[in-house]
Image: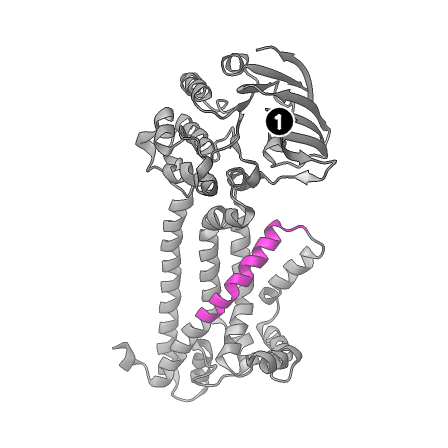
Amino acid sequence: MLLDWLTSEEWTAVRLSVLVASTAVAASLPVGLALAYLLARGRFYGKTLLDTLVHLPLILPPVVTGYLLLLSFGRKAPIGAFLADRFGIVFSFRWTGAALACAVMGFPFMVRAIRLSIEAVDRRLEAAALTLGARPAFVFVVVTLPLILPGILAGMILSFAKSMGEFGATITFVSNIPGETQTLPSAIYTFTQVPGGDMAAMRLTLISVAISMAALIGSELLARFVGRRVSS
Amino acid sequence: MSRPEGLEVTLYHRQGDFTLDIAFRSDSRATALFGPSGSGKTTALNAIAGLLRPERGRIVFDGRIMLDTDGDVFVPPYRRRMGYVFQDGRLFPHLTVRQNLLFGRFFAGRRAARRDPAITLDRVVGLLGIEHILARRPVNLSGGERQRVAIGRALLSEPCMLLMDEPLAALDGARKAEILSVLERLRDVARVPILYVSHDVAEVSRIANNVIVLENGRTGDRWPG
């Protein structure tokens, strides 16, 4: 049994990683979709700057991203204090902070995939829908959204995969607390640092490989299925 | 005051080097906009459908002002009820033929009381001869089938006018003749007037009662039907 094969500490890290990655993907999807739409279709001043900001976590050392998150979302930092006092949302040294770090690190991948699929949409189809009586909001829901679904799925998978492997920003922002912020990579790192931790590190590495492969194969199958449905 | 019937169009629009500057009126059941390619026919049609906002112009249909740049009136395309049949069909690839046909029908739902009893899914499907392809997706249709579905989709949206942009251009001779007779039947059966854009004399003379000639972005002579 898988449950017996892992110690409870290892098992906690696996569960936490999946929770953190899922939360990161779910929370960043609406923002990512809106930004991708804005970047694909919008014409406004500062678009290049916004595009650069979105891509920044891709280029910055993850430690820098994590430190910047700490400076802005820490308990005493401006945004962090505001969110904690007003809404009771605390990020620092909590699993929610790990999810935030993962969301930020996966964001460029998500936005890029969705943006490319929006740019590929034949806008003449949207014009046709308008002449058939659908107002723009409906056109988005019944024409644009189904057509970009493969891109959205690809973006979610990429962001999930990035989140499962995220280490630098997470450990800098929310540290490495077992049961709270110790995700798979942090746990593996910890085990490699203690004498006799080799076997545990190896077991978690295998789990890591299995989850990543399952995500990739799943996304491939899903993309093929959806792609067949919407291809013209 | 008598209500003016038919379509009244005045348009001025520049696009790069091209200038569209036209004015025409028609109250015929089937009007043709006739002219060589590049004469501005599609641009005019897009403006009438509301897909293009011209610099200056006025479009009135049956007394309803669709566009008046002087009075700052612009009725958006989704409220104009112009059934547009595009040259390239533009069927929704993620929907079946039946779903495509009913797309505009769904959004016309609120006007159900005013429905033309001659325009039902069954009748339109019968008129166009597409009973056997309702469950298919557009990717699996031939060019002729696609264009039939596009005509049906526009018709079923209960338009106040049908705009057709060279609907036969992408078809071979035999298919052309088939769809042409469908269009003739449509003109005679349905109550909805047709504005037909083409550069083909034979097509125009078969379909239209009234022809407006376009050349280099300007309206010229009118042929009496």
Colour style of the rendered protein structure? one colour
The percent coordinates of residue A207 (x first, y second) are 36, 73
Residue B15 can be seen in this image: no
Q: Position of residue B63 (x, y in %)?
A: 62, 30
Residues A117 and B181: in front is B181
Q: Nearer the viewer, residue B144 or B57?
A: B57
Element class at badge 1:
loop
> What residue is drawn where x is 63% and y is 32%?
B47
Q: Is residue A27 left or right of residue A215?
A: right
In the image, residue A189 above or below residue B3: below
In depth, the one of A189 and B50 nearer the eye is B50
The answer to whether A79 is drawn above or below residue B64 in the figure is below
**Quarter in which the C terminus of chain A is drawn:** top left
Report the magenta residues as a range.
A22-43
- The residue positioned 39% from the left and 40% from the top of the image is B99
Residue at the top extreme of this rendering: B224
Q: Residue at x 39, y 71 (%)?
A: A208
Residue at the disc numbered 1: B3
Residue A40 lies in magenta, yes or no? Answer: yes
Question: Mark 1: which amino acid?
Answer: Arg
Left or right of B111 on screen, residue A92:
right
* Relative to A35, residue A186 above or below: below
